[in-house]
Amino acid sequence: MSSANAVEIAASPEAIAARLAASRYLADDSLATAIFLAIRLGKPLLLEGAPGVGKTEAAKAIAELLGRELVRLQCYEGIDAGHALYEWNYQRQLLAIRHAGEHEIDIYDDRFLIARPLLQMLRAPEERVLLVDEIDRSDHEFEALLLEFLSDFQISIPERGTIRAATQPIVILTSNRTRELAEALRRRCVYHWIGYPDAQREAEIIMLRSGDVAEAMARAVANAVQEIRARPLAKPPGIAEAVEWANAATILEKGGSPWPQAFRRAIGVLIKDEEDLSAIVPELGRIVEEALG
């Protein structure tokens, strides 16, 4: 899909929200507007929020609505240029030299170049969406490298020269805000904060993404999860865990467990920390009973 088509699809925030919903991702007006502006202005989109609120899923849905491949760069402590840009396959180069004997060989041919996510994006920007996931987990040096890449959308390979994007790439960055990002990076992007949805929106998401969970059960799960998240937990459950809880409880109910018991037995797919379980389990019966009404 070409850049022109991307702009055509991003006709309005409402059009984007409708297309995302068709991809089973519910975006409110503010998120749809941020996506619209990022595409129309040609700027990266920075999505911040707690783990599990749907940042990565938003990037996947954007790639799907544009009909493009999602190229994901997962950040971590110690990530460097070799993991993000490119590397030479030294073993293949050495083997090629041995096989070539006295014949000349270009050891900097494409077949020896390992393209990492940023180079992959530059090679086909009209066919891909770049996701830089959890940029806050990287160090400041890598953040500076990424900022330079986002400024010019080009990289220099000493043996090959400069490679530039033929069209404006679509880039999405996510951050769990475990540390503050540089102001220069923030200024480069269209920014949006994704919070946990309210109970009504979460019930809609559960019904959209779960198998055959009834509306009443989806609303019960959403209400229960809202109360559970309000507790001082080490790892509050995300939206994906809420969907899994609804699915797991439904499977148990069909197997003969009544609803309150089904929810209690399936708690392991919602809460995944021992101390959090110890804090929630004693009150889980009351939380579930109240949520079921």
Image (spheres, grey):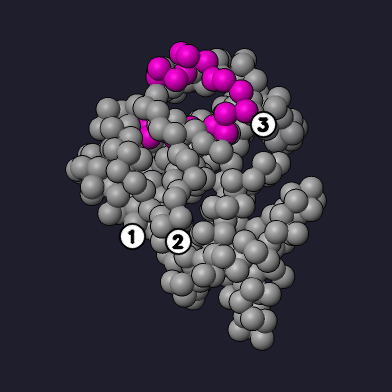
Q: Amino acid at mark 1?
A: Ala
Q: Is residue 89 magenta?
A: no
x 49%, y 45%: residue = 196
- Left or right side of 225 for 252: right
Front: mark 2 or 1? 2
Of residues 257 and 154, the one nearer the viewer is 257
Q: Earlier in the sequence, mark 1 or mark 3?
A: 1
Whole-angstrom CA distance, mark 1 to mark 3, is 32 Å
Measure how far apart labels 3 and 2 are at the Cα level: 33 Å
| Residue 197 is at least partly visible in this image | yes
State how far apart marks 2 and 1 are (Cα).
17 Å
Residue 203 numbered tag = 2
x and y percentages locating residue 195 in the rendered image: 47, 40
Compare marks 3 and 2 and give the one earlier in the sequence: 3
* Numbered circle sitting on residue 22: 1
Callout 2 secondary element: helix
Secondary-structure class at tag 3: loop
Amino acid type indicated by mark 3:
Tyr
Residue positioned 21% across, 42% down in the render = 12
Relative depth, front residue between 7 and 195: 195
Mark 1 burial class by Cα count in 10 Å: few <14, some 14-19, many 20+: some
Q: Position of residue 215 (x, y in %)?
A: 43, 71
Dot 1 falls on a residue whose secondary structure is helix
Amino acid type for the residue under numbered disc 2: Ala
Residue 68 bears which disc, if any? none
Q: Earlier in the sequence, mark 2 or mark 1?
A: 1
Where's residue 63, x and y in %? 40, 47
> Where is 262 relative to 108, above or below?
below
The disc at residue 76 is 3
